[in-house]
Image (cartoon, rainbow, N blue to C red):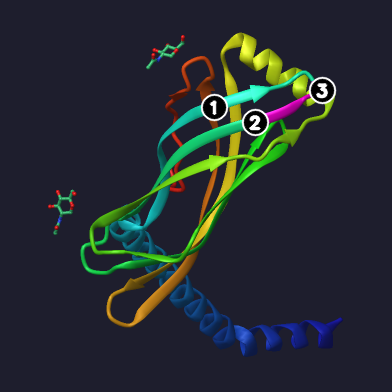
């Protein structure tokens, strides 16, 4: 009994400085993490509004027709704007590719060659996508038919573009701008029903 007590008391005394040391290191690390967090957050607030993004500005359903055999023909115009709000650096966009689908069927692919957007400026891409005749399954054809009767056709636009963007003089970041949204039209007059469609967060 006695030797055991002695041993544990001894051990406690011996580890005490180590415990203090660990506590101090822990505190320093915690403070460092908090400071890094605050710096990142401020950086985010300053930089975030200027991060380049793409968004759908306008669209028009020029033509939609489905025949008795379920063969679909459409032509859609979609205006996508690439925006660079940074006043000090230009942005390079590449691998822009978006697919347009109707009832789960990809009806058109929108692609653009690599392009540059100058400081504090934007570039518009007016995609005119005529689709070659697309045979639809009977259930898809029925959905399109219902949409035509209700004067409401919904497309899904999904895709992305890579952006290379310089921050300051040295750093350069490359990131993906994703677009994923529904584009709704009145097929009778082709009007686009505007909705938010942007890769910008918020
Ligand atoms: C950036 O563009 C906005 C709107 O186009 C304009 O109001 C602003 O003055 C421009 N800033 C610079 C530094 O050119
Ligand atoms: C197109 O049709 C819709 C629904 O009938 C209507 O709300 C819209 O104002 C029309 N747009 C034009 C440009 O005529």
Label 2 element class? strand
Q: Which mark is residue 139?
A: 3
Q: Position of residue 152 (x, y in %)?
A: 57, 17
Q: Residue at x 83, y 23 (%)?
A: 138
Q: Residue at x 61, y 36 (%)?
A: 156
In the rendered structure, the answer to whether residue 200 lies left or right of residue 101 reads: left
Task: Please name the predominant secondary structure of the magenta segment in the image.
Answer: strand
Q: Residue at x 24, y 63 (%)?
A: 119
Q: Which residues are magenta?
A: 69-73
Out of 28 and 167, give the one closest to the viewer: 167
Magenta residue check for 110: no
Circles 1, 2 touching at the beta carbon (< 8 Å): yes
Q: Which mark is residue 73?
A: 2
Alpha carbons under labels 1 and 2: distance apart: 8 Å
Crowding at mark 2 (Cα within 10 Å: few <14, some 14-19, many 20+): some
Q: Which residue of the protein is positioned furthest toward the right in this rendering?
A: 1
Whether residue 6 is situated above or below residue 150 in the rendered picture: below
Crowding at mark 1 (Cα within 10 Å: few <14, some 14-19, many 20+): some
Among the two numbered marks 2 and 3 on one chain, the one whose residue lies closer to the N terminus: 2
> Ligand 2 shows up in which quadrant of the image?
top left
Pointer 1 residue: 63
Label 3 element class? helix
Q: Position of residue 96 (x, y in %)?
A: 51, 58
The residue at label 3 has a CB less than 8 Å from ligand 2: no
Whether residue 15 is situated above or below residue 134 in the rendered picture: below
Q: Residue at x 43, y 72 (%)?
A: 173
């Amino acid at each position: 009994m006695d030797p055991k007590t002695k041993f544990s008391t001894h051990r406690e005394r011996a580890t005490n400085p180590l415990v203090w040391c660990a506590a101090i290191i822990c505190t320093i690390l915690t403070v460092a993490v908090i400071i890094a967090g605050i710096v990142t957050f401020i950086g985010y607030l300053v930089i975030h509004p200027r991060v380049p993004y793409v968004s759908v500005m306008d669209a028009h359903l020029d033509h939609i027709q489905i025949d008795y055999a379920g063969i679909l023909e459409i032509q859609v115009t979609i205006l996508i704007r690439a925006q660079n709000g940074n006043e000090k650096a230009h942005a390079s966009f590449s691998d822009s590719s978006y697919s347009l689908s109707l009832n789960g069927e990809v009806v058109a692919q929108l692609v653009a060659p690599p392009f540059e957007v100058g400081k504090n400026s934007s570039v518009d891409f007016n995609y005119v996508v005529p689709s070659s005749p697309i045979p639809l399954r009977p259930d898809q054809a029925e959905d399109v038919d219902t949409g035509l009767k209700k004067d409401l056709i919904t497309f899904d636009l999904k895709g992305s573009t890579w952006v290379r963007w310089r921050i300051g003089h040295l750093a350069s970041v490359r990131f993906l701008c994703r677009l994923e949204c529904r584009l709704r039209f009145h097929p009778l007059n082709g009007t686009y029903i505007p909705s938010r469609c942007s890769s910008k967060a918020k």
